[in-house]
Amino acid sequence: MYIGELSLQNFRNYNYLNLVLHPGINVFVGDNAQGKTNILEAIYLCATARSHRTNKEREVIKWDQDDAHIKMKIQKKYVEDTIDFHIDNRGKGVAVNRIPIKRLGDLLGVLNVVMFSPEDLKMVKRSPGERRRFIDIELSQLDRVYYDALGKFHKVLKQRNNLLKKFDNINDASNVLEVWDLQMIEYGSIVINKRQDFINELQEIAQEIHYNISGGKEKLEIVYEPSVTTKQYQERLTANHQKDIFRRSTSIGPHRDDMAFLINDMDVRTYGSQGQQRTVVLSIKLAQLRMIQGILGEQPVLLLDDVLSELDYHRQQFLFTHTKDIQTLITCTGIEEGVWNKQNIGKLFKVNKGVVS
Ligand SMILES: Nc1ncnc2c1ncn2[C@@H]1O[C@H](COP(=O)(O)OP(=O)(O)OP(=O)(O)O)[C@@H](O)[C@H]1O
Ligand SMILES: [Mg+2]
């Protein structure tokens, strides 16, 4: 699939923007703070229903305006889909093919993207929360059942935690908690199983890619580290009642999951070099492209925000040979001859203070 047309209105620093994109490589060049990333953010928002850099979507509305609009036309193998995304102070509203959708989940899958930005390093370096965020966003794009189960799980988790704040002793609480526990287990188990399958598949593909990028020197393993297995879920929830009441929060479950990256058995999260950490992210992104293609039978759109300058020549070339038939939007502050000569740039855009030419 590829984005044929994109228009923005009162989005970030854009008053109005209308772009016809190339099905191949689109390059956005400009100085810092001109609006390059803003374009990618708008696209990402339409694909995942969330921004890659903020949880407060109202921030994307142009200052001094009341609402923002994103519109796009997506060309697929056999159909054309349109997305109309609208954000105001009350929230978000979306129409797909001009029909308003009731739930944001209905947007997932209309447009599939893989985004690669310097911030992705957080996934390797920072807290488990960043890694769960990655899994959740990527898996939700691919699997509606996961998206729904995750939403329900978090709802029950919130209710259970509220309840825990009301009890002082375990005798009052245990019977009531058990009712919530059953619901947590129902949705939580779906989340755990689907995360396990996702990471298994990702690991298999990413391992091969990473092996090739590293010239056969590095064996990458991605390991799911669930807080609890589905088998032990009930038993451990019950065993933790006392502790949960004392702490007034739920101590085990998918909301505490993590994932590990190992290179030749070394934990990249703590011991990996900057370059190794970057290569792991690159391998994961390329693996995602292949996974999405396998599941949908369509190529997703690739968004590369400022990453080329961070990859060495060998890795840049590797990236390009793996993204041949994929619509790619690249942002950068300058174009280095050596890298670009070989590439077929479909369209080159200059971005200057919210104006694209
Ligand atoms: N809600 C908003 N309303 C108006 N302008 C905004 C809003 N949010 C951000 N901006 C402006 O958008 C600009 C940043 O745009 P963006 O992040 O796309 O820059 P960039 O071209 O990617 O720069 P860099 O090369 O530094 O990454 C800043 O000048 C910022 O002031
Ligand atoms: Mg930027």
Image (cartoon, helix red, strand yellow):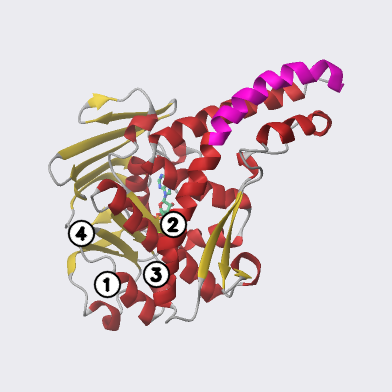
The local secondary structure at tag 3 comes to: helix
Q: In percent of the image, x 38 and y 30: which residue is there?
A: 104
| C-alpha span from label 3 to label 1 | 12 Å
| C-alpha span from label 3 to label 2 | 11 Å
The reply to whether the C-beta atoms of the residues labelled 4 and 3 are less than 8 Å apart is no
Identity of the amino acid at label 1?
Answer: Thr
Q: Quadrant of ligand 2?
A: bottom left
| C-alpha span from label 4 to label 2 | 38 Å
3 or 1: mark nearer the eye? 3
4 or 3: mark nearer the eye? 3
| C-alpha span from label 4 to label 3 | 36 Å
Identity of the amino acid at label 2?
Answer: Leu
Image mark for residue 321: 1
Q: In percent of the image, x 18 and y 54: which residue is there?
A: 21
Mark earlier in primary sequence (3, 2):
2
Secondary structure that dominates the magenta span? helix
Mark earlier in primary sequence (4, 2):
2
| Residue bearing mark 2 | 202
4 or 2: mark nearer the eye? 2
Mark earlier in primary sequence (3, 1):
3
Mark earlier in primary sequence (2, 1):
2
| Residue bearing mark 3 | 209
Identity of the amino acid at label 4?
Answer: Ser
Residue 206 sits inside the magenta stretch? no
Residue 182 sits inside the magenta stretch? yes
Mark earlier in primary sequence (4, 1):
1
Q: In percent of the image, x 41 and y 69: which residue is there?
A: 208
The local secondary structure at tag 1 comes to: helix
Residue 340 at x, y = what percent? 25, 77
